[in-house]
Image (cartoon, rainbow, N blue to C red):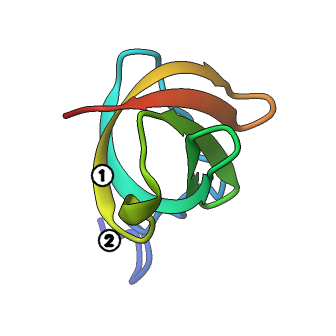
Amino acid sequence: MSRGLFGNWRFRSTRPAFAPGEEIRAYLTGFDPATGVGTVRIGDTVLQVKGAAAGQVDQLVDLRVESFDAGRAVGEAVLRR
């Protein structure tokens, strides 16, 4: 039985959630030189990244999620070297 042309389509969430310990690859979208913390934005989800450098902005980086609040779609991650 056919489910129609769009039967297998799924919409991605604008607020993806991550689990502590999960390793991801994403673009570093910002860096605060005052705190030394980078920012990764994936949809409406924001991860603060420790260990990032200003020169890594707009580059693909490997991260390990340390904590995540799914209700607020925010978390902390550390740069994997």
**Are the residues at dot 2 and dot 1 in contact (C-beta closer than 8 Å)?**
no
First in residue order: circle 2 vs circle 1: 2
- Residue depicted at x 46% and y 16%: 20
Q: Residue at x 70, y 44 (%)?
A: 34
User: What secondary structure is marked by label 2?
Assistant: loop
Q: Is residue 56 above or below residue 7?
A: above
**Which structural element holds mark 1?**
strand
The image shows residue 29 at horizontal and vertical percentages of 54, 64
Marks 2 and 1 sit apart, C-alpha to C-alpha, by: 41 Å
Q: Nearest the camera: 55 or 9?
A: 55
Amino acid at pointer 1: Val
Neighbourhood count class around disc 2 (C-alpha, 10 Å): few under 14, some 14–19, many 20 upward: few
**Residue at (25, 32) in percent of width and height:** 80
Q: Which residue is found at the position 37% from the left and 60% from the top?
A: 56
In the image, which disc is placed on residue 16?
none
Q: Where is residue 4 in the image (x, y as percent from the top left)?
A: 41, 78
Q: Looking at the picture, how far across and down is residue 32, in whole percent?
A: 65, 51
Is residue 67 shown left or right of residue 66? right
* Three-letter code, disc 2: Ser
Q: In which quarter of the image is residue 23?
A: top left
46 w.r.t. 67: above or below:
below
**Quadrant of the snapshot with the N terminus:** bottom left
Judging by the rendered image, the residue that carries numbered circle 1 is 61
Mark 2 or 1: in front is 1
Whether residue 45 sits left or right of residue 1 in the image: it is right
The numbered mark at residue 2 is: 2
- Who is closer to the viewer here, 54 or 8? 54
State left or right for residue 10 relative to residue 48. Answer: left
Residue 74, horizontal then vertical, whole percent:
70, 35
In the image, farthest residue toward the bottom: 5
Residue farthest toward the right in the current orientation of the protein:
72
Label total for image: 2
